[in-house]
Amino acid sequence: MRRHLRGRKVVNHPAVGTTDLAYDDFALPGDPHVSITTYTAEPGTPSADALTLLATWAEAQKQPQTITSNDGRRTRPRHP
């Protein structure tokens, strides 16, 4: 059996406030206990602006950071 649920959800995010989002929840084939949920906002709404802002923050976290040591050398931290 395939399950697909959809609806609307109001989410109160601590950084961007209240957002009104549509959601779609899709069950994955082979395991009824695993699903993927997508959230979207109507274009041009404050909720869409909030999602865009959150996406830019997430992208900024991916950028490598440069550290300047006491002797002026610039390095990037290594990731395990």
Image (cartoon, rainbow, N blue to C red):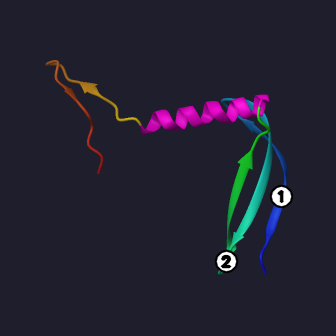
Q: Are marks 2 and 1 in contact (CB under 8 Å)?
A: no
Q: Is residue 50 above or below residue 78?
A: above
Q: Earlier in the sequence, mark 2 or mark 1?
A: 1
Distance from the alpha carbon under mark 2 to that under mark 1: 18 Å
Residue 74: x, y in percent?
Answer: 21, 25
Dividing the picture into quadrants, the one containing residue 21 is top right
Image: magenta residue range: 44-62
Dividing the picture into quadrants, the one containing residue 71 is top left
The residue nearer to you, when weighing 26 against 72, is 26
Mark 2 Cα shell of 10 Å, populated few (<14), some (14-19), many (≥20): few
Q: Residue at x 30, y 46 (%)?
A: 79
Residue 58: x, y in percent?
Answer: 53, 38
User: Split into 4 quadrants, where in the image is the N terminus?
Assistant: bottom right
Main SS of residues in magenta? helix
Q: Residue at x 72, y 70 (%)?
A: 27
Mark 1 Cα shell of 10 Å, populated few (<14), some (14-19), many (≥20): few
Task: Determine whether, in the image, residue 68 is placed left or right of residue 59.
Answer: left
Q: Residue at x 35, y 35 (%)?
A: 64
Q: Residue at x 74, y 30 (%)?
A: 17
Task: Determine whether, in the image, residue 58 is placed left or right of residue 76.
Answer: right
On residue 6, the disc is 1
Q: Is residue 70 above or below residue 4?
A: above
Residue 35: x, y in percent?
Answer: 68, 66
Task: Determine whether, in the image, residue 57 is placed left or right of residue 17.
Answer: left
Q: In what element is the residue under mark 2?
A: loop
Report the label total: 2
Residue 75 is inside the magenta segment: no
- Residue denoted by label 2: 29
Residue 20: x, y in percent?
Answer: 82, 39
Identify which amino acid the numbered label 1 is placed on.
Answer: Arg
Identify which amino acid the numbered label 2 is placed on.
Answer: Pro
